[in-house]
Image (cartoon, rainbow, N blue to C red):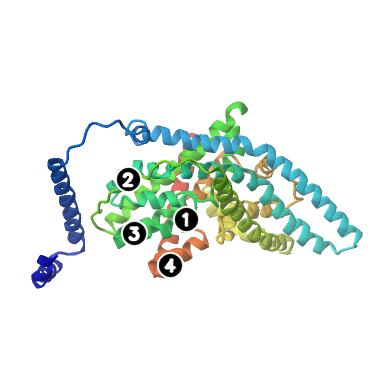
Amino acid sequence: MELITKHSDKITKIFKQVDNAFNGDEKEKLRDQLVKDIYLSAEIIANKSVSVGKRKAEWSEKVDDILTSKLLGFPIMLLMLGGVFWLTIAGANVPSAMLAKALFWFEARITDFFVWAHAPKWIHGILVLGVYRTMAWVVSVMLPPMAIFFPLFTLMEDLGYLPRIAFNLDNFFKKSGAHGKQSLTMSMGFGCNAAGVIAARIIDSPREKLIAIITNNFVPCNGRFPTLIILASIFMGTVVNKTYGSFIAAAIVVGLVLVGISITLLVSWGLSKTVLKGVPSTFTLELPPYRKPQLGQILVRSFIDRTLFVLGRAVMVAAPAGVVVWVFANVGINGINLINYVSNFLNPFAVLIGLDGVILLAFILGLPANEIVIPILVMSYLSAGAMLEPDNTNALHDILVNNGWTWVTALSTMLFSLLHFPCGTTLLTIRKETGSTKWAVFTFILTTVIAIIVNLLVVQLINLFL
């Protein structure tokens, strides 16, 4: 310390010379090299001066050797994700049917009340067929899969498995020109993209932080998982024998997650070679110890912080959306309602990417929250006829099929849901974290263009073979 104080002027002069001699990327490389040299020197000194007896490996180290090994790490990761999705898909249908039966029994009682009170038909239409029925759809279709998926996902998180996933992916991010810590922010994005964007604060390099923020949207969040799981279970699961349907549906969702990760790496590489050029910096990831799951905390966190939060937000947005969609569905010009006007305008372009005008309109109206895309979709379709009461997800399947859906439409919708623009909350978070509207707009445009390109390529490829 005395030496540093004595030569502080010389040290300051050296720092200034280094600052003037190197540009930003060279400084990062110099810093990384200095850190490497320090660790290497420390290791050499420790090896020379400390002798350690042969010790028995801890059980956690043995488990880590398996979970993070190059041979078994990824297969185990895929199996665990597949298991979570399969349990969700296989277990959600029965409670969904029970909820729907109860909620629509109650709707009949409300209708009886309106009839008894001689209420005008338009009031019954807005309040019962618009608001209540939309909320009933949201609760009966979305609650069961979320109530199964979130506790399982929280269990993996509580065990300490998510950092192992980040460790397995670290090398891929470095090769794509991004920072290894992006694997951690991406893992956070599986819960909420806005949280993943905020988590990018752990990355020191402004360039790599921006890459992590812009690409975080490509992993499905809590709001998009229900859409992926529901569509996979009611369409992809029916392609093969019913016995294996849930396995196929789970495999499709796992495949979509891998597509999202692949797009994340590809776009990160593209950004690091173009608008955000630079040299990736290095970091050391210390794996946290395994923890004994706290059942009570898991249930509270998964059910209150995630399931009820997501469901509550969906219901709060879906209720006014139900009013708007019902009004749009029942107000028209020359016998054609407003929804049909807008969806017909969007339809030619939407068909090119495997959707239709109603689906594209649902995504646009769903900008405030991804959870409300399916309810808006259903309300929009039902505007052309009588609304079905969803006995279970089979009723949703019938509605979609009656409006021209095939497994190609479902796959296109899932891909667009996975890759399209972030929700309003995430866009606002990006603007706040970057301090610029420019990057929020850039992210919106980039993700939407990529979603359109991927959908276009997939649909055209399928058309070649069908």
* Circles 3 and 1: CB atoms closer than 8 Å: no
Q: Position of residue 406 (x, y in %)?
A: 59, 40
Q: Which mark is residue 170?
A: 2
Mark positioned earlier in the residue sequence (3 or 4):
3
Label 1 to label 4, Cα distance in Å?
13 Å
**Foreground mark, 4 or 2?**
2
Residue kind at label 4, given as amino acid type:
Arg
Residue kind at label 1, given as amino acid type:
Asn
Q: Secondary structure at mark 1?
A: helix
Mark positioned earlier in the residue sequence (4 or 2):
2
Splitting the image into 4 quarters, where does residue 380 fall?
Answer: bottom right
Residue with the mark numbered 1: 193
Residue kind at label 2, given as amino acid type:
Asp
Q: Position of residue 309 (x, y in %)?
A: 59, 55
* Circles 3 and 4: CB atoms closer than 8 Å: no
Residue with the mark numbered 3: 209
- For the residue pair 432 and 49, the one nearer the viewer reads as 49
